Image: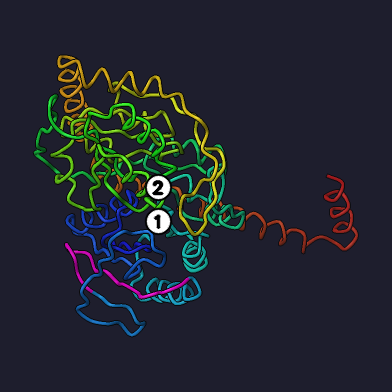
Amino acid sequence: MKILLASTAPYLSNFTGANKINRALVEQLAQRGHSCRVIALRRPMFSISVVDQVLPAEKASAGGADITTLNGVEVHSIDIANPGQLPQLRGYLESQIRSFDPTWILISSEDWGQFLLQAAVETAADRVIYLAHTPAALPFGPDALMPNPLGTKLLQQAAGIISLSHFLSEFIRQWSGCEALTVYPHAYGDGPFPSYGQFDHGYVTMVNPCTVKGISIFLDLARAFPSVPFAAVLSWGTTEHDRDALDALPNVTLIPPTEDIESFFAQTRILLVPSLWHEAFGLVVVEALLRGIPVIASNAGGLPEAKLNTNFVLPVNPIVHYEMDSDRSLAKEVPSQDLGPWIAALEQLLNDRALYERESALSREAASAFLQQIGVEAYERAFAEIATRVAAREAERTAAQAQQAELEQRLAQLSPKKRALFEALRRKT
């Protein structure tokens, strides 16, 4: 197969779960012999990455993209400084669809406003697969940062939708009527994974501390346990205001953003994932579980699914109103939280060695079993199922067109009087 993935995000130094999944997907497909090409931005269009890194270009295309090959994937990077230049990206995508002639065109849901989705659907709708990564980026539903009725219609015209959790698939069905296939992404590596779970050493860590990820709970817990070392791994959502709040606490260590997750997991005793918005799944949860690190997570969205039946899934009052503005906080109104269950859970894991070690062992066992059940082959099966659905829809359209043509032919053979009578009867029904 020939796979074309299009994204409005950079391909490197993009610390989002969506980008990590996308990269793992195309690289694994390339390893299995598929021809994979990516169209992405060379650098962030907005300042959402703390570190900017660009791919070295081996050559430049006629369309203005820098082209390089990374882990078997041909990456086309386009330099765009502001949204006003997006038509350049759209035009490049359309030209690549025509010249590369991909089997499937994958559009990541981090395509705000469904800009690339529209270009792909208008060019080759029956080959477009939408990769749904987060409710916030969808054009519908209560979490949508950019609601877009046109985007919903475009999704309904695409060949198929693949989501990364059963929660997200049900969310899509509930709010759009579209049916999505659930495929758990294999974005964790193959192992073996080191065991970092240590009862008496390391940080209580949070990755991507920001409003929607539950920084308020993290800060309150750090204040409630002043003698316990906490760590905050900065990422795309962390604002200057967030950094100031973290800096104000003497027991919080700030860790720069990095793709080397071992560097901070090796220092982690317990992982906190107190998200206040609907997480689609939560890669970081499984990443920690694989390394024997107990995870205390909220019950928001797909996080209970990502916890893999381990313990310490705690209730939160989710954010109900989102907005996108210049400070990237994504939410101005954060409901008050009951910190009691969080304090109790953290206290248990910090003070009960036997409990900690049981949870560490359970975490590693559950995640290892989960890893054996997933793989890129599931995407290949999903592609085949979508192809079958496309063929069935095309057969239905062909049959309907044939029936209509036959009806028109029969009508043409009727006398004018009988034809008028038939039309009158059809209008009545």
Residue labelled with disc 1:
108
First reached walking from the N terminus: tag 1 or tag 2: 1
- In the image, is residue 71 part of the stretch drawn in magenta? yes
Query: Seen in the image, is 394 located left or right of residue 50?
Result: right
Residue labelled with disc 2:
133
Q: Say if mark 1 contacts mark 2, CB within 8 Å.
A: yes
Whether 325 is drawn above or below 375: the answer is: below
Q: Secondary structure at mark 2?
A: loop
Which of 20/208 is in front? 208
Helix, strand or loop: magenta stretch:
strand
In terms of image quadrants, where is residue 232? Answer: top left
Q: Residues within 10 Å of mark 1 (few under 14, many from 20)?
A: many
Q: Quadrant of the N terminus?
A: bottom left
Whether 287 is drawn above or below 65: the answer is: above
In terms of image quadrants, where is residue 310? Answer: top left
How many numbered markers are drawn? 2
Identified at 19% across, 29% down, the residue is 369
Point out residue 151 in the picture as x, y percentages from the top left corner. 56, 56
In terms of image quadrants, where is residue 31? Answer: bottom left
Q: Secondary structure at mark 1?
A: strand
Identified at 23% across, 60% down, the residue is 34
Give the magenta range: 68-82
The amino acid beneath tag 2 is His
Point out residue 115 in the picture as x, y percentages from the top left corner. 50, 64
Furthest residue in direction bottom, as rendered:
62
